[in-house]
Amino acid sequence: MGESTAAGIALDRWIDAHFDEEVAFLREIVRVPTDTPPGDNAPAAERAAALLEGLGFTVERHAPPVAAVREAGLVSIVDLVVRHRLGDGGPVIALNAHGDVVPPGDGWTHPPYAGEVVDGRLYARGAAVSKSDFATYAFALRALIASGLALEGAVELHFTYDEEVGGGLGPAWLLAEGIVKPDLALCAGFSYAIVTAHNGCLQLAVTVRGRSAHAAMPGTGVDAIRAATIVLSALYAEAATLSTQRSKVDGIGSPTLNVGLVEGGINVNVVPDRMTIKLDRRMTPEEDPGRVETELRALVARALPRDEGLSVEVSTLLLARAMRPAPGHERLVEALQSASADVMPRSIDATGSPLYTDARHYAEAGVPTVLYGAGPRSILDANAKRADEHLVLDDLRLATRVVARTLAALLQPADASRSAGSL
């Protein structure tokens, strides 16, 4: 275990003394639905802003253009930015988490938007991914402010609401508009790993069109579903080959291809004139997204039967590039590992993740970025995006301590950092 300084211990004690307040804050955050779709998330942002203001923060509300919001398939979003300067000079560190979630679905044994706490676990959609880090980051910053430590630099909270559709109007928009210009970024993650790289994601819609006809005379039509099943078979065959490719980044594994949605037809007594296949292709950091998309489009074109009356249209739903480590991310890794060694039995590892996240937007802008926050060892442990998603509250306490200590270490004055021990 690393050596804890008096400052680090004081941060831990402040967090412990205010932990019930932190849990109550998170319960209020998760109680406002942010299902995406439909993506009507401005009300949740306003509630979060009010809670943050109740903690003493000044909250900026930034609304992307309405037309862009509609084009992204959303109803409403507002990005929240909190800025707190702790001393002159020094780096600006962004802490980013997203508040939008997939719909809860069926199978819950706890209400998905009640924030129930049972046996040390908080149950709610978004409890683990990633509304939990609204609390982690806000209370880590509060602890740092309360500590009175002599520091240099600033901390910003970036809370956004469009990660489920790619983050183009969250972190990407805030960065592109110059609203935020951080020097380092820490994005939502889990307590038992520091993620330095992650997969990219390409989502395509493949629409096969034929010609409708009465089911009593099927020969007068062109069956789009029959043709699309041949395309489906080709896609599944391609998916089976991907396991032979392995990323060089620990924790990422192989690329994947998943068909997540199929829809089409008119009625049971009509030859179907259309079928749409929506697929998700995860790309390792080594892969070229342009080449992957070109090859998939060519595969679909080859697989489509050459029957007269058939056509196919392929459209891109999402392209999220992989996150690769930006130079300087080692500073974040070192500080997080040192802090984790002080409050955990051992230091945590830096690794890759097969997911894709908003963090890539910071890395693409040249900002050294890693993922770390509250949560278990994996999304499976938390039931993330499944029924009964939950957060172990001890992990929330742990992550808040680690983040607070990390911020204190990164914001130490230059002369103090040369002689100070770990926080």
Image (cartoon, rainbow, N blue to C red):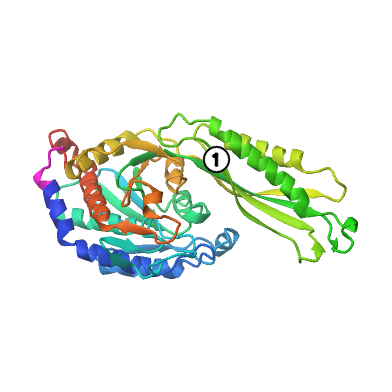
**Where the N terminus falls, by quadrant?**
top left
Picture mark count: 1
Please say whether residue 379 is visible from this viewpoint: yes
Tell me which secondary structure the magenta stretch mostly adopts: loop
Taking the spot 22% from the left edge, 66% from the top edge, the residue there is 21
> Is 174 situated left or right of 306 in this image?
left
Side of 52 relative to 274 (left or right): left
- Residue position for label 1: 256
189 in relation to 69, above or below: above
Residue 394 location (% of width, % of height): 24, 55
User: At which x and y percent is residue 253?
Assistant: 47, 35
Instruction: Name the spot of residue 249 as percent of width and height, x first.
Output: 43, 32
Stretch of the chain drawn in magenta: 1-7
- For the C terminus, the image quarter is top left
Residue at horizontal 77 percent and vertical 43 percent from the top: 304
Badge 1 element: strand
Residue 252: in magenta span? no
Choose between 339 and 185: the one closer to the eye.
Answer: 339
74 on left or right of 352: right
Residue 40 percent across, percent down from the top left: 50, 67
